Image (cartoon, rainbow, N blue to C red):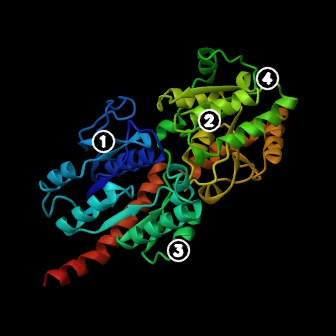
Amino acid sequence: MKILMISDVYFPRVNGVSTSIRTFAESLRAEGHSVHLIAPQYASSPDKNQVADEAWITRIDARRIVFDPEDYLMKWSSLMAYIDTLHPGDYDLVHIHTPFVAHYAGLKIAKKLQVPVVETYHTFFEDYMHHYLPWVPRKLAVNIARWVSHKQCQQVDTVVSPSAQMRDVLQQYGVTTAISVIPTGLDASRFVAGDGMAFREKYGIPAQRPLLLFVGRVAFEKNIQFLLEMLSLVIQDHPEALLVITGEGPAEAMLKKMARDKGLQQNIMFLGYLDRNVGLNAAYQAADIFVFASKSETQGLVLLEAMAQATPVVAIAELGTASILRQEQGALIAEDNELHFAEQVQTLLIDHQLRERVGKQGKRYVEQVWSSEAQAKKLLGCYGRLMLAYLPLAASAAA
């Protein structure tokens, strides 16, 4: 099968969408299928450890987004010039991964090539819009996000949702397009044991110091401020506890100020992005507990990555994370309450045997349920059903 993917984001821009695309593309190619990706050209070159081979990617000239400088938007004129080079028969289907320029270009490509189009709904935009359009009243921003999501999902042949919970939300929006629930799995590299001791030595963290870890984009919707409030409670009994925050994003300045205001400077370390192939696994291994309070995830890959390193998780089970979290199978589930969350963290810090048992059970759970190969087979099944349904329609339209 010849698959054309298109996205408004990809490495070196680090986020869940980039990871999902790479994970599925590698698994699909391993199954003998052809995968090509259209993505923005960034000012910085992709890290060689993030994208080892760019031959399967077409980079399109792009410009920075003023209110979100990490991201770039592909130039429409450059996209159109590339689309002009495509012909029917080049690809069997188009898979869209983001709702901006890529969505509309993907529809145009599918129409030109006379092939079906799939779109993955990666991001719960209803919970994001007001952070990036602060001048728009929150209720209006939510309504805009719902309206756009409904309209775009209705424009494609099949929608892929990373979780059943996100599928239910889309159906509440009135989406009637077929929705397949297909999470992103973990590739084998996520299970390679990281060197947690080397990580601690590199950043001057004593071996016995309690280490809590957050991995992800440092953005408002990740609810990291909740973790700082929680940390204030944890250090009352564990004054040496350290929260390490990896990643970058628009909320970083606010969080650093919040840390100063709360007197947490000695208990928080901001590290920026880490190399995924070595540094990130080492960070998970070094941590005593992975903490996560986001309530807007469509899946929550970092939870699985932490479990793959046998690191126990404390997290709120809401939306996509609810599809992953199982009590004591890698995680203690916390209420949306700083005190209860802190109590779960303290339980694991105090009870070393429980912490080890939960971590080991989490690794076993992820290995059995969340492999990238299993999820890629689900995606291929979705593609196959779509092709079978589409081909008779295409033949009828051509007659």
Which numbered disc flags the more N-terminal residue, 3 or 1? 1
Q: Nearer the viewer, mark 2 or mark 4?
A: 2
Q: Nearer the viewer, mark 4 or mark 1?
A: 1
Q: Amino acid at mark 3?
A: Gln
Q: Are marks 4 and 1 in contact (CB under 8 Å)?
A: no
Tell me if residue 14 can be seen. Answer: yes
Residue labelled with disc 3: 171
- Residue 4, image quadrant: bottom left
Local SS, label 3: helix
Which mark, residue 240? 4
Q: Are marks 3 and 4 in contact (CB under 8 Å)?
A: no
Q: Nearer the viewer, mark 2 or mark 3?
A: 2
**Location of residue 241 in the rendering, given as x and y in whole percent from the top left corner:** 77, 27
**Location of residue 395 in the rendering, given as x and y in whole percent from the top left corner:** 18, 80
Q: Label 1 to label 2, Cα distance in Å?
A: 26 Å
Which residue occupies 78% across, 50% down? 337
Residue labelled with disc 2: 254
Q: Amino acid at mark 1?
A: Arg
Q: Nearer the viewer, residue 193 or 251?
A: 251
Left or right of 273, for residue 321: right
Which mark, residue 63? 1
Q: Are marks 2 and 4 in contact (CB under 8 Å)?
A: no
Q: Are marks 2 and 3 in contact (CB under 8 Å)?
A: no
Q: Label 4 to label 1, Cα distance in Å?
A: 44 Å
Which numbered disc flags the more N-terminal residue, 1 or 2? 1
Which numbered disc flags the more N-terminal residue, 2 or 4? 4
- Mark 4 surroundings within 10 Å by alpha-carbon count, few (fewer than 14), some (14 through 19), many (20 or more): some
Which numbered disc flags the more N-terminal residue, 2 or 3? 3
Q: Nearer the viewer, residue 138 or 250?
A: 138
Q: Nearer the viewer, residue 304 or 216?
A: 216
